Image (tube, rainbow, N blue to C red):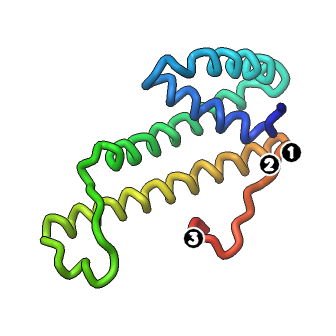
């Protein structure tokens, strides 16, 4: 299966971040890296710059999500039950909300880079949001 260029670079960036944390994706990374090297010959050095930007964005997202995965921010009720939460619990809940906003905002940067790739090479499709919270 062939990915459009922006999606391929995005996927490769994700796999690189995963490789920072586990060797289980080594085979996938190596296959994708071979494809990337072939693409680099066709598209030139700008491709590496876009890949690096996407990699940094995904590392940032990974960091935000890691704080949520660490279990420090627990499960809390929604609705009227919020009034029964302590100040500490409310602060933790606010931290969860802030991480969600951080992830959304960082994903906006990711989509912007993908659209720049489409503009630069005329390949792939721009991500068009209509009445979406990430606009």
Sort mark 1 into few (<14), some (14-19) or many (20+) by Cα contacts within 10 Å: few
Which residue is disc 3 drawn over?
133
What is the x, y in percent for residue 38? 80, 18
Q: Choose mark 1 or mark 3, whichever is in front.
A: 3
Marks 2 and 1, Cα distance to the nearest angstrom?
5 Å
SS category of the residue bearing label 2: helix
Residue 72 is left or right of residue 23, and the answer is left
Residue 88 is left or right of residue 131, and the answer is left
Q: Which label is found at residue 17?
A: none
Sort mark 3 into few (<14), some (14-19) or many (20+) by Cα contacts within 10 Å: few
Residue drawn at 51 percent across, 23 percent down: 19
Which residue is disc 2 drawn over?
119
What is the x, y in percent for residue 93? 27, 65
Q: Do labels 1 and 3 touch, CB within 8 Å? A: no
Q: Do labels 2 and 1 touch, CB within 8 Å? A: yes
Corner quadrant of residue 133: bottom right
Marks 1 and 3, Cα distance to the nearest angstrom?
27 Å
What is the x, y in percent for residue 47? 71, 30
Whether residue 11 is situated above or below residue 101 in the rendered picture? above
Residue drawn at 23 percent across, 61 percent down: 92
Of mark 1 and mark 3, the one earlier in the sequence is 1
Residue 120 is left or right of residue 66, and the answer is right
SS category of the residue bearing label 3: loop
Whether residue 89 is situated above or below residue 42 in the rendered picture? below
Which residue is disc 1 drawn over?
122
Q: Nearer the viewer, residue 30 or 39?
A: 30
What is the x, y in percent for residue 129? 70, 66
């Amino acid at each position: 299966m062939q990915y459009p260029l922006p999606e391929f670079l995005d996927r490769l960036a994700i796999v690189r971040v995963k490789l920072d944390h586990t060797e289980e994706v080594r085979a996938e990374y190596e296959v994708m890296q071979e494809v990337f090297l072939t693409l680099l010959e066709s598209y030139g050095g700008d491709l590496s710059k876009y890949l690096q930007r996407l990699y940094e964005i995904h590392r940032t997202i990974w960091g935000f999500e890691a704080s949520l995965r660490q279990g420090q921010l627990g499960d809390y009720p929604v609705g009227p039950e919020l009034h029964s939460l302590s100040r500490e619990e409310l602060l933790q809940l606010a931290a969860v909300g802030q991480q969600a906003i951080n992830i959304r905002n960082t994903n906006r940067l990711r989509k912007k880079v993908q659209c720049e790739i489409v503009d630069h090479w005329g390949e792939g499709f721009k991500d068009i949001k209509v009445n979406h919270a990430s606009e």
